[in-house]
Image (cartoon, rainbow, N blue to C red):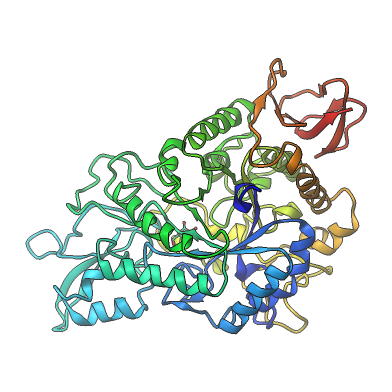
Amino acid sequence: MSSWWRDAVIYQVYIRSFADGNGDGVGDVAGLRSRLPYLAALGVDALWLNPWYASPQVDAGYDVSDYRRLDPLFGDLDDAKALIQEAHAHGLRLILDIVPNHTSDQHAWFQSALAAGPGSEARARYHFRPGRGADGSEPPTDWPSIFGGPAWTRTVDADGKPGDWYLHLFAPEQPDLNWTNQQVRREFEDILRFWLDLGVDGFRIDVAHGLTKDPAFPDLASREAGGMLDAATEDHPYFDRDETLAIYEDWRRVADSYEGERVFVAEAWVADASRVARYLTSTRLHTAFNFGLLSCPWEASALRTEIDATLDVLAAVGAPPTWVLSNHDVIRHATRYGRAHTSLADARHLYGTPVDHALGERRARAAVQLINALPGGTYVYQGEELGLPEVEDLPPSVWQDPNRRYKDHDGPVRDGCRVPLPWSGDAPPFGFSPDGATAPWLPQPAEWKNRTAAAEEQEPDSTLSRYRALLRTRRDWLNRGLGASTALEWLPNAPDGVLAFRRGEVICYANLSAAPVELPAGHRVLIASEPVEGTVLPVDAAAWLVAE
Ligand code: GLC
């Protein structure tokens, strides 16, 4: 039997927007527990939960102040234990999000580092450095924060005078840890054990490619700043450095010392698939998100190039690919695909311009059918199974994304893909919260009354119904072609703009061309993203076929 994670469908639960159990307008563990039957019925194999640890919530929980406690916003440890047990009872594995690159500035370590002063052992767990210039008033390097502004903030010494600077690749409230420090390394292994002991099945590693920094702290000077989306290149001062790989060898030993297959998935925005492969040897991590596809336009040749590149390099290290179309950091793909230009870069550029939602949703349905036929695992970002679009017109007064604090940050606000899910009913909060609750932490569009899970459940042709049928069919055919062990074989002579390949007994056709295409004779349609009349696959549709 092949390992569960090699072809798992993993559902990303953005916990604060999934379901609110206690009525404070923010999703929580109680809400998630009440919706486990929905997730089991959807047919996914595992859940990945965004951070639920104690946190001041400056960056929606990616600023952790205590890695062994839940934030009271979400629940407590007893809730966590109950969730792990109930998820397992539903046949769902559970993956947590570990945030090792940085802590919150409210973490006890950072507070004691500030108090202890320059040169102290407490400061050695972070990156504190003197400033440049005669009076040290210039940051130690020219590195920018991903969220805008400089990546360094100056501290104030006990005597009230300006002191050293500390590094934060993200917000100033997210100081970077120093991973050459042995205490840091041991502490994180201990945190992994804490959660593995409680029964979690693995971890998604936040900013997995960022942990180590060039000890010489060189300027970026003329090289690409390397935001998270701009692929880093070789020998970058803080991304994708060789020293980071050794950390994961230690982590792998920890995971392997547990029963069951406990796994890691890396969030590694690196230059290309060959750089990702370095993280995925059998002594390092199990899988990494494949952001290549998520960045790609809806174009057959671009997708095929990306698919081939990924399969090639990952086969060489024996790691399965994972296919991702959306997550909590990027513009939802139902919106990306609804414009004339469809890459992620285009979407950032075209933010707020008119969208053809019907087209976007149709392509999104075809895309999910396509990725679920590829070798490896797939991710579902909560709400994509309802066909939810990006909410691009949230009023600035409700924005919470920290990147919006900086004028030089040119990316779209990430709140638009984080709007609380619509579950039922005709008006907000659409069953997200119980009756009489505080309003959801971000407002939901009134049109979402047609997009609730309850409404879509009634509709055999809704995106939700199609996801359920798709994932059911995928499971049924895992042993006959769609499973991890079967290679992908491109079919010769596919018309231009059509992706056509075989996996064992199953053939997948995805029509990204401008005209309907004829499906191969002698086959019946197992499932398709749009109704298929006779043997004709419409535009922007995908189908799985088997021999008659
Ligand atoms: C990752 C997370 C993102 C967060 C950042 C800093 O990219 O996905 O949401 O802001 O790391 O932790």
Looking at the image, residue 140 sits to the left or right of residue 367; the answer is left
Which residue is the extreme one toward the right? 534
Name the quadrant containing residue 230: top left
Q: Which residue occupies the foreground of this view, 456 or 214?
A: 214
- Taking 301 as reference, is 219 above or below it? below
Q: Is residue 389 left or right of residue 472?
A: left
Where does the image place residue 474, in percent across and percent down from the top left?
Answer: 76, 45
Q: Does residue 9 appear left or right of residue 474 in this picture?
A: left
106 left or right of 298 in image: left
Q: Which of the image's four quarters has the C terminus?
A: top right
Q: Nearer the viewer, residue 116 or 515?
A: 116
Residue 468 or residue 222, whichever sits in front = 468
Residue 393 visible in the picture: yes
Q: Position of residue 349 (x, y in %)?
A: 52, 42
Placement of 423 over or under 247, stated as above or below: below
Res. 64 image quadrant: bottom left
Residue farthest top in this picture: 493
| Spot occupied by residue 487 in the image (x, y as percentages of width and height) | 63, 32
Residue at image location 71% in from the left, 56% down from the top: 44
Q: Is residue 53 above or below residue 135?
A: below
- Evaluate whether residue 446 shows in this view: no
Tally of numbered discs: 0
Residue at the farthest left position: 134
Residue drawn at the location 31% of the way across and 68% of the way down: 184
| Residue 294 coordinates in the image, percent (x, y) | 57, 43
